[in-house]
Image (cartoon, rainbow, N blue to C red):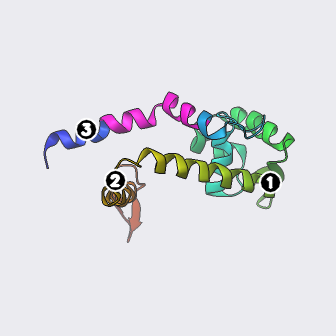
Amino acid sequence: MENNVGREIADALGVLLKRSTRIELHRTLTAGMGEAVDELTYPILSGLDRTGPRSAADLAPDVGLDRSGVTRRASRLEAAGLVRREPDPSDRRATLLALTDEGERAVETLRQRLSDHITASLSSWPADEAAAFASHLRRFVADGPFTQPRRLRGDFLP
């Protein structure tokens, strides 16, 4: 494999991972979803969907915000009935953020919009190339440089 393949992938990922790229995508996906659901609150909804109930402090690193940023956005979502606060069973002093049923429906709508957006962007690709891309991307995410080290018999494996 040529050295420039890694560089090409790194350059493409740089564009995908830019904050401005994510914000524009989230803005597109949340259009018309209501006042509380926008490019700022999308990461909170998506993060809670991926992880289940979490404290604001625990969710913050996953969504690229600090605890107070998560709390402010979660309060907007709570006022809209999309997120609720519940006691943390492991710490009576703490609370967890959790999606309500309405929040889960909103996330399902957002996931479908994202899927449709991706499908539309690949519509000019031959079906077998799009399927191969999806397969290779899944493999790259599972085995690539972004995976956490796995512990096996006391050793860390890449």
**Does 135 sit above or below residue 26?**
below
Spot occupied by residue 22 in the image (x, y as percentages of width and height): 53, 35
> Counting residues from the N terminus, which is met first, the one under dot 2 or under dot 1?
1
Q: Which residues are magenta?
A: 11-26
Q: Which residue is mark 2?
A: 144
140 left or right, relative to 87 = left
Spot occupied by residue 119 in the image (x, y as percentages of width and height): 47, 51
Q: Is residue 7 visible?
A: yes
79 left or right, relative to 27 = right
Q: Main secondary structure of the magenta part?
A: helix
* Residue 88 magenta: no
**Of discs 2 and 1, which sits in the foreground?**
1
Q: Residue at x 58, y 45 (%)?
A: 62
Labels 2 & 1 near each other (Cβ < 8 A):
no
The one of 133 and 18 positioned closer to us in this rendering? 133
Q: Secondary structure at mark 2?
A: loop
**Quadrant of residue 75 within the rendered picture:** top right
The one of 121 and 80 positioned closer to us in this rendering? 121
Report the Cα–Cα distance between label 3 and label 1: 41 Å
Find the residue positioned furthest to the bottom. 153
Q: Residue at x 72, y 50 (%)?
A: 106
91 left or right, relative to 141 = right
* Three-letter amino acid code at the position of disc 2: Gly
Q: Which residue is mark 3?
A: 8
* Three-letter amino acid code at the position of disc 1: Glu
